Image (cartoon, rainbow, N blue to C red):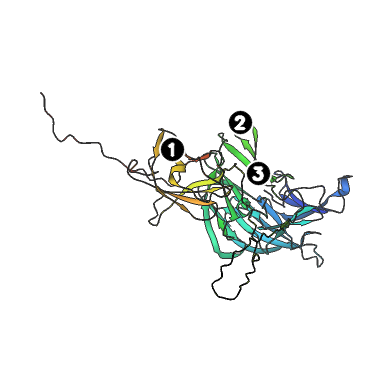
Amino acid sequence: MRNITSYLNDKLKSSEHTVYNKSDPKMNIIVSRARTSVMDSDYWTVETIRESPNLGDISVAPRRYKPYGPPNRIYEIHVDNGIVGTSIREYPDRLKEGWKEQFILGSGSSVAIGFNGNWEAYRKRWRLITEECPWIFWVDENNILWRQHWDDESTKSELAYNVTSVKAIRAWKNKFFLERDQGIVVAYILKDGSIWYRSYSQQLNGNYAWEEARQLLGFHGGAISLNMFITNDYRMGFTIESSEGEIYWYLTKRNWAGMAIETDKITISPYQLSTEFIPLTYLNVFIETEKISISPTSINVSRLFANTYNEITGVSNIPDENGDWGWIIEFSTLNKIPNLTLDKIKIIDEETPAFILIDRVEAISERTYRLYLSSLVVETGLHNILGNVSIVISDSLNEAGYTYLEFSDSFKPVNQVWVDIPLPEVEKAWNE
């Protein structure tokens, strides 16, 4: 995942990042160009964004329309004396206009900014080509985290509550697999010190959507600061400082398939064709001799996926048509399963442990499925489950008819509503 306001790459011809000194009420943006390595102290150009005795959090992001050369504008969001505001600066600033104030969002304590866009290869390196305007994020005085597409107020929406700090980054997008777009990742710290995140990413149908909130599992300490970064081998990472003063790093898997080498084109054609004619025996039935000519009308070649490895790439419970989150589980797989049936799926309550019955399975797309739970055994669905729920897929077949190796994943149901189950009542008692 990638935030181009903070990511330095000594191979790029232009890179930007921000530096903030808590003891100095000024925020500087540092811009470098031309060289491929830092050679001396005058390598950096330092520019003051704003000066204020009560300057707080600030975040900067450049807009780029071409995969080469410098960006054409810089966008900024800040907290000044407890008020969240925005500004822009043309780049390069040939008219010497400086930073131009834009609009005010109200009271707040923490801010972040990030551009959505697409990665394009230029001279064997991938560069982010951005949209016209960025997404902005801020935590208001009630600790509610908001998002908005720059100045478009119709896109303003709440992302989370009880939030103390927020960061955003545009992560890697694999152009060859839609389901591997990590999207704009918005990570935030809750008052209890836990780390959560939401992503704005491209779905299998090609549309962009804000996905459900997910907790950064594995981190169990109380977080006091957070940052994110991307690596040159197509990973995204979290850097977290705990209340004990320890630093934790978390890295995703590589999102590299098809990205690390130039694309190839494979053309398939028949190597050799042959036609065999079978002699015909004619009976003399007092009709003229007939001649039958045979030739192939078309040739079709099919390539079937035969790999036996598969994995679950995402799983969560979703609401039904009544808004009830306890009865539908949706999950996606790395490779498609042409004919997934109920006998290939097991749903397990890990806390009990106990099996959860499924009424039916529905294929939403080639790699996305929905499981509709049965109330015959568990009358409360997912609502009264205390721990994680496992989903296990076994004996499923790929396109070529080979059996996938068993694969599984687990998740913690969200939006549960505890259902009280009355104790059984004694209807009759007697002694003998």
Q: Where residue 232 sits: x, y (%)?
A: 74, 45
Q: Which mark is residue 244?
A: 2
**N-terminal label among 2 and 3:** 3
Residue 392: in sight, yes or no?
Answer: yes
Q: Which mark is residue 227?
A: 3
Residue 54: in sight, yes or no?
Answer: no
Amino acid type, callout 1: Ile
Query: Could you say whether the residue bearing mark 3 is in a helix, strand or loop?
Result: strand
Mark 2, other Cα within 10 Å: few <14 / some 14–19 / many ≥20? few
**N-terminal label among 1 and 3:** 3
Mark 1, other Cα within 10 Å: few <14 / some 14–19 / many ≥20? some
Tag 2 and tag 1, C-beta contact below 8 Å: no
Mark toward the viewer: 2 or 1: 1
Q: Which mark is residue 348?
A: 1
Tag 2 and tag 3, C-beta contact below 8 Å: no
Query: Could you say whether the residue bearing mark 2 is in a helix, strand or loop?
Result: loop
The image shows residue 206, relative to residue 328, as above or below, that is: below
Which residue sits at x=65%, y=54%?
113
Mark toward the viewer: 1 or 3: 1
Q: Where residue 398 sits: x, y (%)?
A: 56, 47
Cα gap from disc 2 to disc 3, whole angstroms: 17 Å
Question: In this image, 127 relative to 421: left or right?
Answer: right
Looking at this view, is 312 or 188 the one in front? 312
Cα gap from disc 1 to disc 3, whole angstroms: 35 Å
